[in-house]
Amino acid sequence: MFPAVLQGSQGAALQFHWGDGFAGIRHYFAGFPSGSSFRYLSGKTELSFWAQIGASFSISGFYTVVGGLAGLTGGVLLGVYFAVSRARWMKRLLELTGILPDFVIVILLQFLVVYVASETGMVVFKVASASTDDPAFALPLISTILIPANYMVRNVALQMNNAFTEDYINFAKARGLGKTYIVFFHALPNVLPFIKADLHKFMGILFGNLFIFEYLYNLNGVTLFVFSNAFANEGYQYGLVVNGLLALLALYAVVYALLRAVVYGWEKVIVR
C-alpha cells in the first residue's frame, strides 16, 4: 500500500497519507462481492484481471520453472566440477561474473548478439520481443538460467571444498574408493542439506530478477503486466498490484515445490 501512502505534487514536499493506504485495503476487501477488486484500467479501458493474468502467468511461469530447474541442476553439477577442477582461470571468471549486477549481464548479452550480427550479418538470438506474436525466447532463457546458476555454482563449490577436508573423505580415500564415487556418494550427500537450505536464496535471485528480465527483454510476464498498469489515469490501482503480488506468490510456491522435489530425488539416489 506504500505508493498510496507516499504522495506529492510538483514543487511540494512528499507527504505520508496513511489513511489513503488503509482505505485502499478496505476498498479491496469490500470489492470482493461485486468483483471490482479484480477489475483494472489499462489506459482508459476496464479489463478483468482474471482474463488477462493467464497469459502473463504462463510467460513468467515458463521462464522461472525452466530457469529454476536448469539453473539448480547445472549449478550443482558445475559447482562439483569447480570444486575438483584445477582450472584457476575458470574460477576467477566465475568470481568476476558473480560481482556484475544482473542487469549488466543482460545488457552485455544483448550487446554481444548485436556485435555478432554487425560483424557476421547473422542474428543469433533476438535481443527483445517485438510483440507478443514475435517473442524473444533463447536469450531471456539463457539469462534466467545463468544468473541464479552462478550463485548455486559458487555455493556448491564452497561447500564441496569444505566437505573434502572432513575425516570421512580421507577415510574413503584410504579404503581405495574411486574419486567419482567419493564425490557423488560421500561429499555431495553432505552438501545437499546446504543446497536445500539455500533454495529460498536461489529463488530470491530468480524472482528478484524477474522484473529485470521481463522489462529488458519486453516479456509481458506478471511483473511487467503489474508495473505497466499499476498507475492509470494518474491513479494508483491498489487491487491490481495486490492481485499481481498474489499471483507471484502462487508462482513462487509452485517453483519452490518443484525444486524441493528435485533435491528430494537426488537424496533418494545418492544418499546411502
Image (cartoon, rainbow, N blue to C red):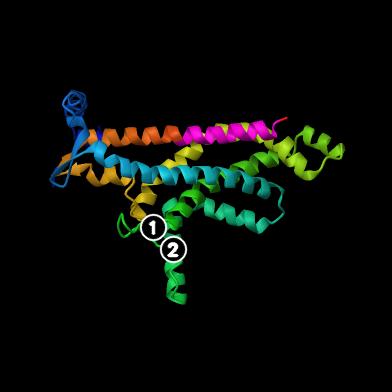
Give the residue at mark 2.
Answer: 125
Q: Name the residue at 20% across, 43% down.
A: 231
Q: Which residues are magenta?
A: 255-271
Q: Are marks 2 and 1 in contact (CB under 8 Å)?
A: yes
Judge whether residue 48 can be spotted in this image: yes
Q: Amino acid at mark 1?
A: Ala
Q: Amino acid at mark 2?
A: Phe
Q: Name the residue at 67% across, 56% down.
A: 88
Say the numbered circle drawn on residue 136: 1
The spot of residue 24 in percent (x, y) is: 19, 29
Q: Quadrant of residue 42?
A: top left
Mark 2 neighbour density, 10 Å: few (under 14) some (14–19) many (20 or more): some
Residue 35 as seen in the image, left or right of residue 72: left
Residue 200 as seen in the image, left or right of residue 61: right
* CA distance for labels 2 and 1: 8 Å
Q: Name the residue at 48% across, 45% down.
A: 66
